[in-house]
Image: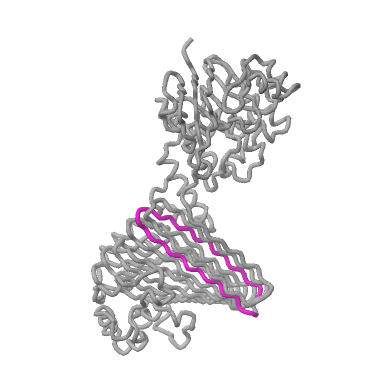
Amino acid sequence: MNDFLKIEGLKAQIDADGTPKEILKGLDLNIPKGEVHAIMGPNGSGKSTLSYVLAGREEYEVTGGTASFKGQDLLELEPEERAALGVFLAFQSPVELPGVNNANFLRTAVNAVRRARGEEELDAVAFLKLAREETARLSMSGEMLKRAVNVGFSGGEKKRNEVLQMRLLQPSLAILDETDSGLDIDALRIVAEGVNSLRGPDFSALVITHHQRLLEYIVPDRVHVMAHGRIIHSGGPEVATQLEKQGYKQFLEAAQ
Amino acid sequence: MSGETSLAWQALRERAGERAALLGAEGVPTKRVEAWHYTSLQPLNQVKWQAAPALDEAQVGARLSELNLPKGQGLVVFANGRFCAGLSSLPETVKQGSGEDEANEPALLADRFAAQLNAALRQPGLNLHVPEGCDAGLLVLVSLTEGDEVSTHLHHRITLEKGARLSLLDVQLGRGRYFTNPQLDVECAEGAHLTHVTRQDESAEAIRLGISGARIEGRGNYDSFTLNQGGALARQEVVSRLEGAFANVNVNAIQLIDGARLNDLTSMIHHASPDCTSRQTVRTVLSEAGQGVFQGKILVDQVAQKTDGYQMNQALLLSEKGQMNSKPELEIYADDVKCSHGATVGALDEDQLFYMRSRGVPEAQARDALVQAFLFETVELIEDETLREHLLKALPGYV
């Protein structure tokens, strides 16, 4: 099997008021093509940092290890190049873009990615038709396309907007950073369906979550437990149930 | 400073003839004068400004066709300070007044340098009367200046009688190293409404000291918007006085400053009556070594209870060499007022940039989109769709 996402010994730090603070401390992770993996871990274990490092956020400095995707050195690429290659990060806190129309933004993003992938760009009419179908599918109001990106959106609307972007950009690796936080059960189901609809032999996902609940809807192939900047345990979906019942304590102790 | 006045100053005094008395003896204000602390007028001292010669009307007409002007109910064109009758047309509903009526000139601008200079050297401009209750629609005013070491000093006056309405698109542009010093006096009688959109697109080598003064009576509205994006050194000064209850003034602006140019928006909003509102949003984008100035004063008299004032000025610095000087001033003598204000200066938001890039939008495109969004939000304050579209298209890189 070809390597799809392959992370080895990854170390990353962030500048904390002038002193570097190491957050990822030698992380190993492989996600084969077509698989959905989940990462669970206590607060401060470095889950969000991992998602930002994979998406290319500049303020995190990679100090060691490697991360490759489809055989390419991911860490060498600009964020937009990673997106073109198929990486998509659903943000834990989606960013508001006042003055930027949501439909225009989505079309700009879709066409930038299509251009980079050597596909034909969508004209305004074709794009709007597609966007309307997708919003309906996510039970989103068409009004959300006319508004500024995420401005005045409720927490649930913002997360649906992330899933809308994901559906439109057709990534081959989706990283969902606590997409379930702040969602009620209906919204959670819709978001999960959005992810599940993309599942297939060419789609992988890394689902970062605190709660087992999301994993009832998006059933993962593997579950990894993360603590202190490393993966300390990996197993099947049953690990999530075990965590929900017993907490992180036993895994933390076993990793000592 | 007397005794140190420049040759440029002497040349202007000579041209003013007996009206030179209006200029005072101090010469061009130095940076020691508070109103000019951030905007140095030294470049004004370096040229012996001559009267601008007449331009060929056919060539002026050709320039007009490049401007994509919206079609209004009237078009009035001035070239090098002279009225171009062949290019202009006024709607029948309004009257072009004749001559100056200085006895009635309000003292609103009396102590301001740009107005003093205009008073001494003024050339007759638009002098418009919109009768009671008349909606005169959209009027386009174009002021073109061409040449080097020449100056123009047009004086315009617009009077809206009770309940009258007018939209004015005020386009100013040119070629060369000229100096332009236009003044506009506005009178809004009770319930009158003037929308005034200024597109300042002067030559990048020009000096400009533009000034307007508006008196607004009860329930009247002076809704002004300035796009400042031309001139080597360009100040637009907007002075307004709310003189009757429930009047409103908007003094919104955007400034786009690149190269080593300086653009300045200086304003005075004087609440002289109770129950009035004022709104001001000024956004400045600075690139390269551009210098921006915002000086906005709100004065609330003791009688002006229930004043509702809002002022916000924000600057976006796209380069480390750009510089922004902001001086908001609130002077409030009434005790029952609501006046909010704020000022920010900053670079583009890294979170927003990363968010866009993570969706595949290339960095340069993401930056442009965020700058446009910053400006777009302000242009949206123009209610008239025709004027809003025209202004958007006048912005660089607008798609």
Comparing A181 with B273, the one in front is A181
| Residue at x-position 32% and y-position 56% | B259
Q: Main secondary structure of the magenta part?
A: strand
From the viewer's perspective, tell me whether residue B2 is left or right of residue B215.
left
Residue B19 place in picture, x, y as percent: 33, 87
Tell me how the rendering is colored. one colour
Magenta stretch contains residue B291: yes
| Residue at x-position 52% and y-position 57% | B344
Can residue B168 be seen here?
yes
Residue A251 place in picture, x, y as percent: 67, 20
Comparing B169 with A161, the one in front is A161
Residue A252 place in picture, x, y as percent: 66, 23
Q: Residue furthest top?
A: A1
From the viewer's perspective, tell me whether residue B209 is left or right of residue B311.
left
Q: Residue furthest right?
A: A245
Position of A36 relative to B226 (above/below): above
| Quadrant housing residue A180 | top right
Q: Which residues lie in the magenta part?
A: B274-302
Question: Quadrant location of the C terminus of chain B?
Answer: top left
Comparing B17 with B371, the one in front is B371
Q: How many marks?
A: 0
Can residue B134 be seen here?
no
| Residue at x-position 61% and y-position 24% | A226
Position of B199 relative to B317 (above/below): below
Position of B35 relative to A103 (above/below): below
From the viewer's perspective, tell me whether residue A47 is left or right of residue B130.
right
Residue A209 place in picture, x, y as percent: 65, 27
From the viewer's perspective, tell me whether residue B365 is left or right of residue B83.
right
Question: Quadrant location of the N terminus of chain B?
Answer: bottom left
